[in-house]
Image (cartoon, rainbow, N blue to C red):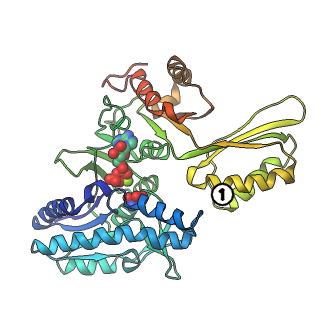
Amino acid sequence: MALIVQKFGGTSVANPEKIKAVAARVMGYSRQGHKVVVVLSAMAGETNRLISLATEVQEQPDTREMDVLLSSGEQVTVALFAMAVKAAGQEAVSLLGDQVKIITDTMHTKARIKSIDTEPITRHLAAGKIVVVAGFQGVTDDLDITTLGRGGSDTTAVALAAALKADQCEIYTDVEGVYTTDPNICSSARKIDRISYDEMLELASLGAKVLDIRSVGFAKRYKVPVHVRSTFTEAVGTLVVEEDKDMESMLVSGVTYNKNEARITLSKVQDVPGVASKIFTPISDAGIVVDMIIQNTRAGEMTDMTFTVPRTDYKKAMSIVQDIVAEIGAGDVTGSEQIAKVSIVGVGMRNHSGIATTMFRILAEEGINIQMISTSEIKVSCVIDEKYTELAVRSLHDGFGLHQTGQSV
Ligand code: ADP
Ligand code: ASP
Ligand code: MG
């Protein structure tokens, strides 16, 4: 008899019929004698709907109130799910973030989990109930509701699995596992059977939203094996585990894209010590995470500075930068929300040269202009015009041979 945490994403609980179908599947595990903790997302589209409601009322919504609003999506699905189980004659109980005591910091809309009290869950499990926990939400020490950032239900599930020392953590979603790239935009994407925490961390950080990055961080830290699989089939999915020698050792293991960033450029910035700190300190003080930064060399004593921020923080970052421009005597500020970052990822890149140039050639052959580049040991990222994202992903995927099992460059 095992203790299993099973998380179902928004498309898996998109309507009452799907909720009933998922409940039936979970009850099957419970009838086999397993203890099951279910973590649910809001119905597909619901979190987006709530965000647009908020922006209709307040242009830059107050983040504390935003969390009160957003957490309602998961409250609906856990209640309906528990009803579905009870209607089918089994015992279940729904619990919200504050009832489980998922304690977080106070960073509203992107809070981090500090601790979890497992007692309420183990008590209900011992009473023979299926425990249904609202994903994505927590509570501060002062009892304010928080949310964990988009895709945060994955993190709730893995953090619960770690805290409960569960035997398994299964992430059920609308695809059959982790693929070499998003199977919804590239038909030749292949399912990966096993992937290491480190490689998954990289894929997730660069946009493979099939697993939220913080969930992979928890999984790695607490050694929780995660099984990503489909809600709609019985097929075995992808195991995210510690690196071992049986793993496919590919030069490039995946292609990702991220359309959630925006670019800001300050032109004619004075090229003197202290300028970067003056620009980026107020931005980080506002809780905005800057991703790529490029500083050009220019003739004279001026330079251009370009960087990317999450698209949701674009307006806030722009207004901060506009205030600094006057102070540091820079030229104008321009920006674009229509950008995408496409990346190739693979630990095999460490010992190979020429991977980045192959990427640049593939993009050039499609007539795609590269606006920014960043590299690390195991990834190369390029910022391009958003409208070429799908074309870039497909060309890179097949160009690096990921559509075949034996890869060539
Ligand atoms: P859920 O609502 O179940 O959390 P998400 O939409 O957050 O599901 O994540 C699943 C989606 O992730 C898939 O439908 C797919 O479009 C996308 N995706 C992006 N990159 C990958 C990848 N490398 N492998 C699998 N899915 C991916
Ligand atoms: N409902 C939240 C979102 O859409 C959390 C999640 O689904 O994981 O981002
Ligand atoms: Mg998700």
Tell me if 48 is positioned left or right of 76 in this view: right
Please name the amino acid that badge 1 sits on: Lys
Q: Nearer the viewer, residue 29 or 230?
A: 230
Dot 1 alpha-carbon crowd within 10 angstroms: few under 14, some 14 to 19, many 20 or more: some
Ligand 2 under 8 Å from disc 1 Cβ: no
> Going by the image, does 184 lie left or right of 399?
left
Q: Position of residue 165 (x, y in %)?
A: 32, 66
Q: Quadrant of residue 193?
A: top left
Quadrant for residue 293, please give it: top right
Q: Quadrant of the C terminus?
A: top left
The residue singled out by tag 1 in the image is 316
On screen, 256 above or below 329? above
Q: Which x, y percent locates residue 177? A: 29, 44
Question: Which of the image's four quarters has the N terminus?
Answer: bottom left
**Viewer can see residue 62:** yes
Q: Residue at x 36, y 22 (%)?
A: 407
Asked if 348 appears above or below 264 in the picture, the reply is above
Q: Secondary structure at mark 1?
A: helix
Counting from the top left corner in percent of width and height, residue 378 is at 51, 35
Left or right of residue 351, residue 301 in this image: right
Is 292 placed above or below 315 here?
Answer: above
Q: Residue lying at the far front in this picture: please name it.
A: 56
| Residue 222 visible here | no
Residue at 37 percent across and 67 percent down: it is 73
- Residue nearer the viewer, 188 or 112: 188
The residue drawn where x is 45% and y is 52% is 213
Residue placed at 27% from the left, 77% from the top?
122
